[in-house]
Amino acid sequence: MVFSFLRSIKQSILTRFPSSPPPLTITAYRLYTGTDDHSYVETIQIPCMERLDVSQLYINTTPPGSVYERHNAPQRNFVLTLSGTLEFTTSLGEKFILKTGDILLAEDVTGHGHSWKMLGDEPWVRVYITLP
């Protein structure tokens, strides 16, 4: 199972950057809580060779058509989407689409939170990498 998981991550990266040299950074979405307790989203660049301390890794699957009403991230996580398409909504109504191959840094562990709903017919298969 671990080897097939690693193969799918490698394939996701290869399809994202098919014929170009390896990037120095990878674009990700960052979901965070502002000083007003509302959630916000921004695009960030993650350095490719930077090593990060992590506390755990787990895989989760959600069926197509699922909806998760407003909630906070349970802890700081990188979320690597292996399949599926979702529409996220911040507490102020800003929307963004997360799709196969996208990375989300979920840091809105306090405040008004965010919600999401599945789009399309694929399940949301993702890897959570919990940060200390």
Image: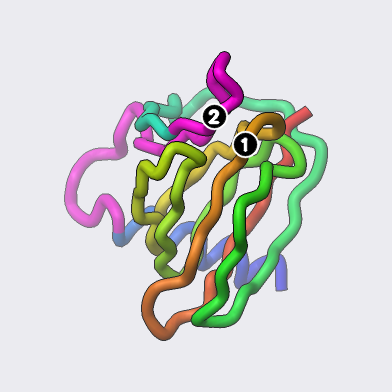
Picture layout, residue 16 above or below residue 94: below
Mark 2: amino acid? His
Q: Give how far across and how far down residue 45 sits, in percent.
A: 38, 27
Q: Which residue is drawn at 39% across and 73% down?
A: 119
Q: Give how far across and how far down residue 56 sits, in percent.
A: 80, 44
The part of the image, by quadrant, that contains residue 84 is: bottom left
Q: Which residue is drawn at 76% across and 43% down?
A: 74
Image quarter (top left, top right, bottom left or bottom right) of the N terminus: bottom right
Q: Give how far across and how far down residue 31 sits, in percent.
A: 51, 35
Residue 99: assigned label? none
Pick out the residue farthest to the bottom. Answer: 121
What is the tally of numbered marks visible in this picture?
Answer: 2
Q: Is residue 93 visible?
A: yes
Q: Which of marks 1 and 2 is nearer the N terminus?
A: 2
Mark 1 — residue? 112
Q: Is residue 101 visible?
A: no
The part of the image, by quadrant, that contains residue 132 is: top right
Span of residues in magenta: 16-40
Picture layout, residue 19 above or below residue 44: below
Report the side of 1 relative to 40 (left or right): right
Q: Which of 43 and 16 is in front in this view?
A: 43
Mark 2 — residue? 38
Question: Is the residue marked by circle 2 packed among few (<14), some (14-19), or many (20+) residues within 10 Å?
Answer: some
Q: Residue at x 58, y 49 (%)?
A: 79
* Disc 1 and disc 2 in contact, CB within 8 angstroms: yes
Q: Does the magenta stretch include residue 131?
A: no
Q: Which of 121 and 8 is in front in this view?
A: 121
Picture layout, residue 87 above or below residue 90: below
